[in-house]
Image: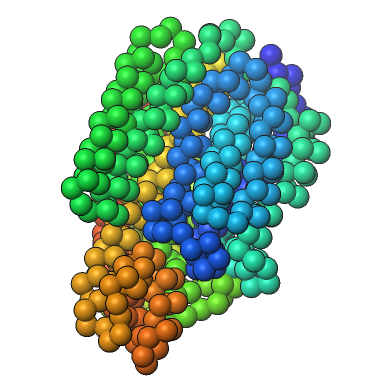
Amino acid sequence: MTPTLSPLRRWSALGVLVLPVLLISIDMSVLGIAVPALSAALNPTSTQLLWIIDLYSFLLAGLLVFMGSLGDRIGRRRLLLLGAPLFGAASLLAAFATSPEMLIAARALLGLGGATLMPSTLGLIRTIFPDRRQRRTAIAVWAMAFSGGSALGPVVGGLLLEHFWWGSVFLLNVPVIVAFLAAAPFLLPESRDPAPGPFDPLSAVLSILGMLGLVYALKTVATQPDAGAALTAAAAAVLGAGALAWFVARQRRRPDPMIDVSLFESLAFTSAILVNVVSMLALMGLMFFLPQFLMLVRGMGAAEAGLWTLPLAAATVVGTLAAAPLAGRLSVRTVIAAGLACSTLGLLCASLLDELAWPGPFLVLSALFGVGVGLAETLTNDVVLAAAPPERAGSAAAISETGYEFGGAMGTALLGTAGMAVYAAGVRDAAGTVPGLNAADAEAAAQTLAASRDIAAALPDGGAGLLEAADAAFLAGIDLIALIAAGLMAALLALTWHGLREEAATDPRH
């Protein structure tokens, strides 16, 4: 039983909980701005580059459910204090990686460390703020740290890269983790499930195998379109789908499941989780492409490109802060639907970057999409936590955060792979028209946009034909992922308007 906290300690504890959330969300997007420098230093393939970016999120997502269950049992504060040093050490390893393989391993360790941090933050908010009105405000701050951190990643990364090497984007984590470890033992209360069931490591293994199997299949078929790769992708897809099906069936049978699948019987709960997934999918898909667009297509430096992403971060904060006051006047369903509508319109603007005068579409995209994501994600977390009994707060938080992280990982895995496949095809198709470009260099240029710049510099006339083809192919990739994300968001708007009737009917304010 957690003792009653004074208002000062309660809000101070929230400030401490925001620190790891901010770091984890920044780490999801900060590499987008570092891709050109990282590519030049480590020379990864397009597949390695995507693994570097999204293996972190996928391991984090795969372990969140298990770690949420573990926090319910051993204590959420204890789990936070165990995971923070691992996260800091993995950040140091990533900062000084000397090969793509080493950086991939470091990102995997970051995912492991992050998984110990994330479930406890939202679970502890439920404990610290039992009053729903206060909790809604606290969740707004939490969501602002998560969504705003994702949007701020390129800003922070750009400023660091202006003065330091690409690995410096990870060193920011270390002093923040030290500050967290200094404050958390004194400000955070302990919280756990009073009647925990047995551990279930098999379910954790199944969830990880399932998600990684499906993502590996997607990557393989998109980046290596040949018969051998197709067979490998099919095998990985079958393994992944089978593992996830076994995982779900196992949760239904167990008296103490890692995921309480009965929560999904609530259409409001399910709709809220889907909003988290799709919003983060779209956000991280954009954060994979937009920094490269600004630096390599528009020719900006890292710091300037980072500052151009600031309107998106600011709009996300505005939407997040506006969500709770608007929910006091309107129904939760109305505010979330408005957020999804804004996000859809913003994504449609992203498909016009190559057609309308700069910087109009970019600024409209940033404003509409940022406000929309801020509005929608803040209130869906409140729906998720309100649907769960207090003793299952960690499990409910893990489901919600898994939605965030899974969506973020799918942003780079699904949208990133699709967009880069369009880019690669466009470069290969145009290779024969570029003077002096041999087959090996054409294939290298098709791997990443940064590689096309290096190869063009060695061609006659600066490789103007290759640069033009690469830019056109990259913009075609952005158009595709923007339209995919907009379509998903529009479909989700219709589903959510129906699904959240349940929440609107039970909201005591309406």
Q: In the figure, is residue 450 to the left or right of 37?
A: left
Left or right: residue 97 versus residue 335 is right
* Whether residue 321 is visible: no
Residue 163 appears in the rendering: yes
Q: Quadrant of residue 292?
A: bottom left
Residue 63 position, x and y percent, is: 50, 30
Name which residue lies at 44% across and 17% down.
202
Q: Is residue 356 left or right of residue 179?
A: left
The one of 204 and 5 positioned closer to us in this rendering: 204
Q: Judge from the rendering whether residue 365 lies leftward or rightward of residue 442; answer left or right.
A: right
Q: How many marks?
A: 0
* Image quarter of the C terminus: top left
94 up-or-down from 259: above or below = below
The colour scheme applied to this rendered structure is rainbow
- Residue at coordinates 53% horizontally, 58% vertically from top-left? 31
Q: Residue at x 79, y 30 (%)?
A: 185
Q: Looking at the image, is 502 positioned above or below residue 276?
A: above
For image coordinates 33% across by 25% down, the residue present is 243
Q: Is residue 438 above or below residue 333?
A: below
Q: Quadrant of the N terminus?
A: top right
> What residue occupies the far left of the structure in this picture?
227
Give the quadrant of residue 181.
Answer: top right
Residue 143: % across, % down: 54, 44
Please provide percent x and percent y for residue 437.
30, 80
